[in-house]
Structures are given as C-alpha cells and as structure tokens.
Image: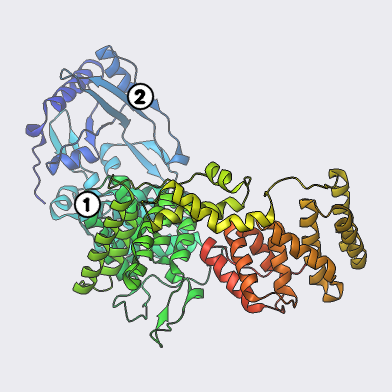
Amino acid sequence: MKIDIHIAKNLTPEEQEIFSIIKEVIQKYTPSTQTFVVGGWTRDKLLGIPSSDIDIMLDNISGENFAKLVTKHMQIKDPHVIRSNPEKSKHIETSKAYIPLSSGVIQEIDFAQARSEVYKDSRIPEIRPATPQEDAFRRDLTINSIFYNIIENKIEDFTGKGIQDLISNTIRTPQNPLKTFSDDPLRIWRVIRFAAKYNGNIDNETYQAMKDPSLRDEIRKKISKERIGQEFIKILKNPNPQIALQLLQDTGLMEDIIAEAIRGTQYEGKIAKFEMSQENPNHKLNLWKHTMEDVKGILEEYKEAEPEKRVIMILAALMHDIGKLYQEIWAESKSHPGHRSYHGHEDESAKIIDLIFRYLKIESYIQQVAGLARYHMRPHHFVRDEGGARALRKFIRQMGEESLNWLDVFNIAVSDAYAKDIIQDPDTVKDYQELKNKLQEALSSLSPVPDKPELKPILDGNEIMAVLGIKPGPHMKEIIEFVKELKDENPNITKEEAVQKLKNQYQDNIKRAGKVGGKASSSCPIHLLKNKIDEINNLFQDKKYYEVLTNLNFLKNQYGNDENINRLLSIASFRLLLKGEKYRDNELLQFIMDRAEKNFFDTILCSYATGILLLIETKTKDKVIKEIGSRMIKMSPEIFKNILNMLPDKIDRPNLKKQFQKEIIRRTKMPIIQQKQP
C-alpha cells in the first residue's frame, strides 16, 4: 500500500485546531506530558483515508485528569468518564470530551493513559501505567500500534514493524502471536476482521497460531458468546466478508461455533464437516465451496444495500444449506440412484440457524435469516414445475405474511442455483430470469404498487363470520386461508363472488352443525363437570376402566348436548381404547362420531374422534378419515400431533397415521416423537 508518513501536512483545519488546543493545555498545565494520537486514526491517515475517530494517549497523567484540564482550559462542560468494566471488555478507564471548534463542529475525543496488560487466568488483564513503547507492544496488530506524536508532529513506530507492515499489507501481532491470542483469544477475530478489511496477508507465524488447537479451550473459557457474536457481525459489515468467512473456516472457528451451538441438542454428534462432498450430480462443488459461491453472488446482488440488510443476506447465503450437514436426513436419491438426497434440509437449516444465533446472542437476525433459509427452495420448485400465476401470487402473499421480501427469497434461490459450479450454466440463468419475470407479472396483478403487494384478503374475519353465521374459534384459521386463496386464484375477484364461493364451500356443513360455538341446550353444571373429570382421572389411575365406561354413559345420557361433555367423552374413550378394544362401547363411539360430524369445527372433539378411527377397525372409509384429519392439522396441529404421538405402533390404519405425520411435519415443522401410551 502507498502511505504518506508526513501526517502533519495533511491535517484538516479541524484536526489542526484540536491539536493546537492539546498543545496549549500541555504547555500551560503539564509540560512534561507526551501525547499521541493512537489507533485507527493514525493508520487511516497514513493510508490517506479520512477519519474523525480521535483517541489521545498520555504517558504520565490519567485520561480523566487530562480531559478535565482540557475542559477547564476551554471553559466547557466536564468530560464524561467511562469507568473500566472488564466483563464488557472495557479494561481501562477513558474520558470523553466534546470540544466545540470554530467551524461549528463538536469533536468527540477519547483520552486514556498509556498502559500495559498482565494476563493471568482470564482475558481480563491487570492494568498498569506504562510507557508509550510498552503500550504499542500490547496492542493487537502492528498496523494498529503506530502513533502520531502531537507535540513533535511526527510518526512513532515503536514496534519497528508497523509502517513496513502497512506498506506490505501484512497482518501480524506485535509480540509472540500464540501468547497474544492465549492472553486474549478475541484478538484472533480482530486479525480476521482486519485481514478481510484490507485484503491483507496474514503473517505465517500469526496464521499458524490462529489455527493452534490449544486455543479452542481458551476461546471457550475467556470469551463470552456475546462478544464473539459482536465480532462476527462486525466482520460481515466490513469490506470483503467472504475473505473473513473463508478464514473462519480455515482456522476451524466456524466448525467450533457450530459444534458449541448444537451441544446437547438432537444434532450433536450427527453434523458433518462443512467441506463435505454433496454426492449429488446437480452439485459439482463441495458444500463449503458451494456456500462461498453463493455468498459471492449475494454480495454482488446486494453491494449497494444498507449494512443491516447486507448482513442479513450474507448470513442467509452462509446458512441456507447448513441443514445438509445433519446426517439424519441423508438418503439415497430416487431420481439419481447411488447419489445422495437432502429432503427437508431447508427446515433443518432454519432450526440450526436458530441454535447458532441464540448461542452467539444475535437473536435479532433469527426471524429473517431462518425464514430465508426455510423458503429458499420454493423458487426452485417453480422452475421445475412451471408454477402457474396462482401459485406465484400465493408465494408472494405468504412471504409477506412471514415478514419476508419475496425478492430476497428469490435472490437467495438464484445465488444457490448459480453456485452449483464455478461457471454459471446459461440455461439455469435463463430459467431463473424467466421466473423473475413471471413473479413480477404476478406481483403487478396483486397491487398497483410494485414493491408492496396487497395482502389484505377480500373478506375479513368479521365478514366471514357474518356470512356463515359462526363464532370465533380455531376453525377460522382454515376458512381465512380459503378466502385468501380465492384472491391468489383471481386477484380481481369481487366481494360478492367471494361470498358466494365461501357459502358454496362451507354452507352445507354449517347447516348440519348448527351455529358453531353456541351453548348446548342441556349443559352440565361446571362443578359437576370438574368433579367428573377428577373422578374419571382417578379411575384411570386405579385401572378401573369399566367404571370409567359407566361414568361416560351416564354423562352421555344426561348431558349429551353439552360440548364440554362431548369432548370429555371423546378423550376418555380414546384413552380407554388405548388400554384395549375390550373397552369398546359401540353405542358410545357412534354417539361421539355423530357429534363430531355435526360439530366439525370443534378441534378437540374431532381430533380425538379421528384418533379413535385410526386406532380401531370401523366401517369408515379412509377418504373420510383423511378429510377430517387434514382439517384438524390445518385447524389445530398441536392437538392432533399429540394424539398421533399417543397411538401405538399396532393400529388399524398405520398408513393413514404416517400420512398425517408427514403432513404435520410439512405444515408445521413439528417433529413427531413417539410417546408412551397413557
């Protein structure tokens, strides 16, 4: 790099005024004091880069005392003292003074005394006053150890390496790197950040120390996860983040982060190395190289984006395929026998992202990055299946409902598709450009404002309930989604047309069921209901199952119109049948099925009724059970998932159970865990 060591002649008028004030204070109050501008300002001035971050170091007076002399001399407000706080990586006390200049600018300046650091068993050092030379050698990098002597108007390179390393663009520590990193392992991250920022060459001794396995324990012991997370985000905001990411991978730090984040979870011991071969004919690069090509594509696409937006997209590109590392989802490809498939890797990516970001204390990025990873396969499906306008409009709408920008999801998918090889396939480029055109056409049909599609359904919840004569409840989720899809199919649909389609879809069921959510004509007193629930639970505990049946029939005969009783009947009957089919009461079961048919919006009643139909042999057709089960998954997936969990392996309709389990995973990303029978 080209540098100019004659800083004095390149000072701005503001800088000249500031340094003149400093000289006046020293001459008037403390003439023996040496004072230096340290850190980034000196480095950047040598490189010809403007900087307003002025840090002043003093050799024989505290920062607080000198800052007070400055404010006294100028008759301005006392400085703001920032006490040391080692737990927050603030090892020394500094003072900030806000100096008004003749230009009208208020210049913020930090003052601190030269110091040395003695490390023992943590990265929190013992701080001692020191000479400027000692202060230079305790700093992280030689290029950050160059000082500007204000009194003598000259550069001081006490390490003897700073100027030369700046010229040769070499990144190295002033002292033995292994000791430097052992004292404070966070400095490894700073080396990576500066190497990426300046596209610098890391000195070999420094680089080898960064890779030393002995530092892994030092990192875990001495650096908080929050500090690692902060450095990680700084790296991504600086120039050339792709260089930093490659260094994190080469030094093993990336693998360490993943391993620590998944410790104690289902993924521990089941995650492959990031550089694994994908063993897939569609990918010519290993997973890490593919990921880095993806990152490069996103950096190009978002080079003009705001820093926070750019960070989100880089993180999404970095993490979008991380679910492929999870060996439990590896399977043989059906379309390419002998090769590997990664079905559902996008969902696993979202889960692993959640773990990693919580580990690094950067939770604010989870929603966007995990969302982009979870949906990045959607555009690929459109390219393969030639999704029609309805599907594209639905995609745009659903991304908006997830607080995601559809174009960001598309761009992640595009960079993913282009990154299958170093050289982009012209046919792939053509396919995704055509898809982008189709998506933009679909967007135009949704809204006159190109970047803000109209997501409001043609009928709101109140209008739906008024049309169907129903009350609020879990059933509304399915109906609202149906109404939204009306607009996906026809963005120009009128309210009258939507009302008619809504009636056609649900009116018959509503007439059969009566008004959903209304009170039963014969209700069980609340105190009796509670007593019966307790009594039935006690009977189950005592294994008095026939007495349970007696109680259920009593409740059926006395309070059969009470919806709470109907739910209790379905739950208790399901539990009885799990104990054995000898506790089957056909009249009671028929009653439960009749109530479920008439109250098809009652998710508890219908879910347990479906569980019974899966468990025992009945004349009910698979098609009917599948229709009810699918509705329950839409309306109340958590309840239905729990019922499936309770079913034993040996049931009458195991295939239907498996279909429902797959549908739950697909819709809700909730894993099925086999539970003990109640």
- Residue 183 percent across, percent down from the top left: 40, 51
Left or right, 662 with respect to 179, comes to right
Residue with the mark numbered 1: 303
Between residues 112 and 101, which one lies in front from this camera angle?
Answer: 101
Q: Residue at x 93, y 64 (%)?
A: 547
Residue with the mark numbered 2: 64
Element at label 2: helix
Q: Residues within 10 Å of mark 2 (few under 14, many from 20)?
A: many
Q: Name the mark nearer the viewer: 2 or 1.
A: 1
Mark 2 / mark 1, whichever is N-terminal: 2
Amino acid on which disc 2 is placed: Glu
- Residue 352 percent across, percent down from the top left: 47, 61
Element at label 1: loop
Find the residue positioned furthest to the top. 75
Residue 561 higher or lower than 295, as above or below: above
Residue 78 higher or lower than 252, as above or below: above
Left or right, 117 with respect to 221, comes to left
Find the residue positioned furthest to the bottom. 338
Q: Quadrant of the C terminus?
A: bottom right
Confirm whether residue 222 shows in the render.
Answer: no
Q: Residue at x 27, y 47 (%)?
A: 450
Marks 2 and 1: CB-CB under 8 Å? no
Q: Residue at x 20, y 52 (%)?
A: 198
Between residues 246 and 526, which one lies in front from this camera angle?
Answer: 526
